[in-house]
Amino acid sequence: MAREYPEYPIVGVAAVVVRAGQVLLVQRGREPGKGLWGVPGGVLELGEAVVDGVRREVREECGIEIEVGPLLGVFEPQQRDDAGRLRYHYVVLDYLAHYVSGELRAADDADDARWVALDALESLPMLAETRAMIRKGVDLAAV
């Protein structure tokens, strides 16, 4: 099924990866959201367990291994075209995760990947929902 103008919502997974007061962010290389910063993630593959999908997406986009923690929430991005037709519709399960190993590099559909200090989040272009999910993950990781 096409991601653009889908017949039904597409299930995605993402990870708020925290490490030493920083969060892992990627700059999207494709639509929707090209150029925006966000947490690594992507589409769940058919037959794939959700947690396995989270690990795979972070590995593909950033080259690192993570330990997946609890579900933080559900993010439901939708984007309409100028005619009002639904161009994109995702249901994304966002998980808290912790860095395990590997050297960070931007790969797959990410234009850039980096560890970002929490006080620098406001300076990067990203969706408000992404910032809220990051804050939720950072608060939970600190407990």
Image (cartoon, rainbow, N blue to C red):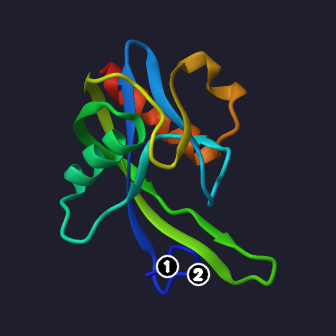
Q: Which structural element holds mark 1?
A: loop
Q: Which structural element holds mark 2?
A: loop
Q: Position of residue 104 (x, y in %)?
A: 40, 25
**Residue 130's quadrant in the figure?**
top right
In the image, what residue occupies the spot 54% across and 20% down? 118
Q: Name the kind of residue labelled 1 in the image.
A: Ala
Farthest top residue? Answer: 20
In the image, what residue occupies the spot 35% across and 44% down? 60
Check residue 113 in the rendering and tell me which mark sits there, or answer none.
none
**Residue 86's quadrant in the figure?**
bottom right
Residue under pointer 2: 5
In the image, what residue occupies the spot 68% across and 31% down? 124
Q: Are marks 2 and 1 in contact (CB under 8 Å)?
A: yes
Neighbor class of circle 2 (other Cα within 10 Å; few <14, some 14-19, many 20+) is some
Q: Quadrant of the C terminus?
A: top left
Closer-to-camera residue (84/34): 34
**Residue 77's quadrant in the figure?**
bottom right
Distance between mark 2 and mark 1 Cα atoms: 7 Å
Query: In the visual, does 92 lie left or right of 118?
Result: left
Q: Position of residue 33 (x, y in %)?
A: 64, 54
Q: Position of residue 16 (x, y in %)?
A: 40, 36
Query: 89 above or below 135?
Result: below
Residue 64 at least partly seen: yes
Q: Position of residue 12 (x, y in %)?
A: 39, 60
